[in-house]
Amino acid sequence: MTHAVAPTVTARAASFAVDRTLCFPADALDIARLSIYDCLAVAIAGTREPVSQAVRGLVRQEGGAPQASAFGLSERIPARAAALLNGAVAHALDYDDTHFDFVGHPSVAVLPAALAVAEQQQAGGKALLEAFLIGVEITCRVGGWLGRPHYNAGFHQTATSGAFGATAASARLLGLDAGQATHALGLAATRASGLKCQFGTMAKPFHAGMAASTGVEAAALAALGFIARPDAIECPGGFAATHGAAQGCADEPFAGLSEAFRFVDVQHKFHACCHGTHPALEALKTLRTRHGLQPGDIAGVSLDIAPQWLPVCCIPQPATALEAKFSLSLTAAMVLAGVDTAALASFSDAACRDASLAELARRVEICPDPAVADTACRATVLTRSGVSLACQVELADPMTYETRATRLRGKVAALLGTQPAQALWDFVETLDALQAPDLYPRLHAWMAGEAA
């Protein structure tokens, strides 16, 4: 079915981005704080990853005006460069949040842009938090409007839709009016890019940095009077039409705002691998725990998943730690063998060469089923004694704030240590009340690795 293309997507996004009369729902602000906490933690943990080192080397060589803090650097660098580096670092571990309205990672594209521009402008914590929430909401809304055809055509929505959210957050922090914001989004439409064929390589986390950097650049140029086509997302020959999104789009992407924010349905990761593997891993973990399964008990495993995950996270014989994160058969074998898939160290080149894991992975059959949602999996384990054990998991089932916060705090403690995790929690919890003179020195300490 072909839906009518809304004529005002760019303009609606721009108006929402710069609206100073918005009342932000408390539940949306709560989830936004959790995502900032999660995003900062995975970035701190990912600072020494190869992609982080490479991009840090690039921005250090270029130097420039000391405008914003960056992970792993004691010096400040230009805001656009900080957004590029921080986005790549935050996505380096592929352990950050995901939203299934558009199948992408909103926080790692938007938060680095918001942090860079907020520090450059010396905005307070409340303005930073609200700009972040605006940005991730626009990422979800525009991403959902672009639809699955855009993703299935081969585009990584973290990079594409994320660029629009990063632009919106930057535009708000720079104080742009609605007209300037449409030009910023129009420029972002011609800059946004990112291909799913890069999954399993360093280019995937770099996509988040690309989106964040595009957002800072587009908004900064609009503030300087730059003119772009103000309907470039939805116009004939525009972003949607040329990026596989002419069909499958929601008719009214901004319905319900500002009473309800779609971002509250964000999914946080509790396994250090592609989110497409998570429903299966949760189901298999449940079966292993419930029935005391050992690898030798298992004759075969059947995983019914959404077909769209086949080209994303079903690498049959991964050879590297990065590829392992996108191999459903290997990660399934890891769970069934009792390997902790929440631990970063579990994903390594050595795990790909482990003969026992490889043999167990060969017993895993992946069955695409269009009736299975992106966030779900039906897992069946056939034991050597002939018993069939089944479990179905739906990640979209509601999770209370308290449960989510507890699980995230446990995740961050495992990544950073108990005391740093508590200190980071206290910092983010008080973000709204922090003013620039206190906020940015503390933020710089965290990002430079100098926090006590």
Image (cartoon, rainbow, N blue to C red):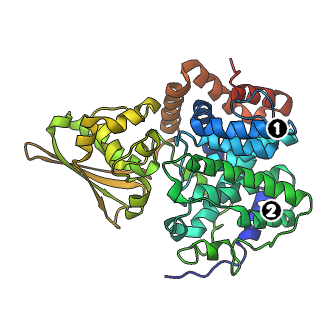
Quarter of the rendering occupied by the C terminus: top right
Q: Is residue 277 placed above or below 63 in the rendered structure?
A: below
The residue labelled by disc 2 is 184
Q: Where is residue 61 in the image (x, y as percent from the top left)?
A: 77, 37
Q: Residue furthest right?
A: 225
Q: Disc 2 or disc 1, which is closer to the eye? A: 1
Q: What residue is drawn where x is 66% and y is 77%? A: 6
Q: What residue is drawn where x is 88% and y is 64%? A: 226
Q: Is residue 255 placed above or below 37 in the rendered structure?
A: below
Q: Position of residue 119 (x, y in %)?
A: 82, 38
Q: What residue is drawn where x is 73% and y is 67%? A: 190
Do we see residue 234 in this rendering? yes
The residue labelled by disc 1 is 63
Q: Is residue 391 placed above or below 403 in the rendered structure?
A: below
- Real-space CA distance between mark 2 and mark 1, rounded to the nearest whole angstrom: 25 Å
Do we see residue 39 in this rendering? no
Count residues near mark 1 (Cα–Cα under 10 Å), then give few for <14, some for 14-19, many for 20+: few
Q: What residue is drawn where x is 74% and y is 62%? A: 188
Please tell me whether mark 1 sits on a helix, a strand or a loop.
loop
Q: Is residue 292 left or right of residue 31?
A: left
Q: Which of 395 and 205 is in front in this view?
A: 205
Type of amino acid under label 1:
Gly
Please tell me whether mark 2 sits on a helix, a strand or a loop.
helix
Q: Nearer the viewer, residue 443 or 85?
A: 85
Q: In this view, does 260 lie to the left or right of 81?
A: left
Q: Which residue lies furthest to the front in this view?
A: 61
Q: Residue furthest left?
A: 385
Question: Given contact means CB atoms under 8 Å apart, are the residues at marks 2 and 1 in contact?
Answer: no
Q: Where is residue 46 in the image (x, y as percent from the top left)?
A: 58, 34
Type of amino acid under label 2:
Ala
Which image quadrant is residue 159 in? Answer: bottom right
